[in-house]
Image (spheres, helix red, strand yellow):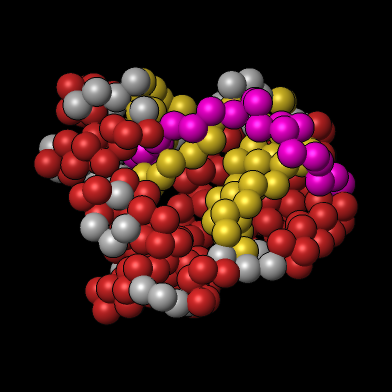
Amino acid sequence: MAGHSKWASIKHKKKATDAKRGALFTKLTRAITVAAREGGGDPEGNPALTLAIQKAKDASMPKDNIERAIAKGTGADQDADAFEAVVYEGYGPGGVAVLVEALTDNRNRTSSDLRHAFSKHGGNLGEPGSVAWIFEKKGQIVVDAARYEEDDLLAAIEAGAEDVAADGDVLEVVTAPGDLTAIRTALAEADVELQSVELVMRPTNRVEVDEGQAGSLMRLLDTLEDNDDVQAVHANFDVDADVLERVLSAS
């Protein structure tokens, strides 16, 4: 699984770069607005909003931007009402299952864009339910294994984490979705620096991909993540970390 976790770590670094260009801010603003619309503007009673706000803070989004996004979601804003959460499912190169979470104001446009992306990079967009059964929602915290050992994350176990394990050059903390915020807080209080904190759809099984398939797969996943409507991309691939490093360096 080392390659898969390395991908999660690289995604976090890529998002930090995207934020400087403003690309990530658009997605984060949309997520905050929709979370506030659906669950109210008080983070204490709205876990989805809490997580969306924390992601925005991690990306250094200005406080004013966050407050405007919340106000937009809780007010009578037609633009906020236009967005809906949609999950797309498909297969990538090598038979890898891909789950795409999107917030869109135009299903036809998003479906067309994603279908084209899958087709261009050797995959295909599937029917609802075709791959969702392979995934389960979990909280996931990624920590740099070069700086910390599993014993350093004891605070996560004490706070209720389901698992803490080394995976290549990262450590992964897996939590129940509702425990993610509390475990993040516990690790922060223990002075552990976190690479990423998010709700993910973790695969219950993985498909091994070789170097030839990995290149096409990474291009597909990057294309999907670069789409403005896409909030998150999940896949059940496994690839050797060194192979992934070569593939990403060549892209």
Identify the residue shown where x is 26% and y is 41%: 181
Query: Is residue 17 something one can see in this rendering?
Result: no
Residue lying farthest to the front in this orientation = 76
Taking depth in this image into account, of 33 and 115 the one nearest to the observer is 33
Taking depth in this image into account, of 178 and 16 the one nearest to the observer is 178
Taking depth in this image into account, of 93 and 10 the one nearest to the observer is 93
Tell me residue 2's x, y (percent): 54, 30
Query: Is residue 71 something one can see in this rendering?
Result: yes
Tell me residue 127's x, y (percent): 80, 39
Identify the residue shown where x is 70% and y is 47%: 88
Question: Looking at the picture, does residue 181 appear above or below residue 172?
Answer: below
**In the visual, does 16 lie left or right of 239?**
left
Q: Quadrant of the C terminus?
A: bottom right
**Residue range of the region highlighted in magenta in the rendering:** 121-145
Taking depth in this image into account, of 157 and 215 the one nearest to the observer is 157
Q: Is residue 52 highlighted in magenta?
A: no
Identify the residue shown where x is 38% and y is 34%: 177
- Quarter of the view holding residue 163: top left
Residue lying farthest to the left in this orientation = 189
Identify the residue shown where x is 49% and y is 39%: 200
Tell me residue 201's x, y (percent): 53, 35
Q: Quadrant of the N terminus?
A: top right
- Quarter of the view holding residue 103: bottom right
Tell me residue 37's x, y (percent): 40, 62
- Number of marks: 0
**In the visual, does 167 lie left or right of 147?**
right
Question: Looking at the picture, does residue 1 appear above or below residue 111?
Answer: above
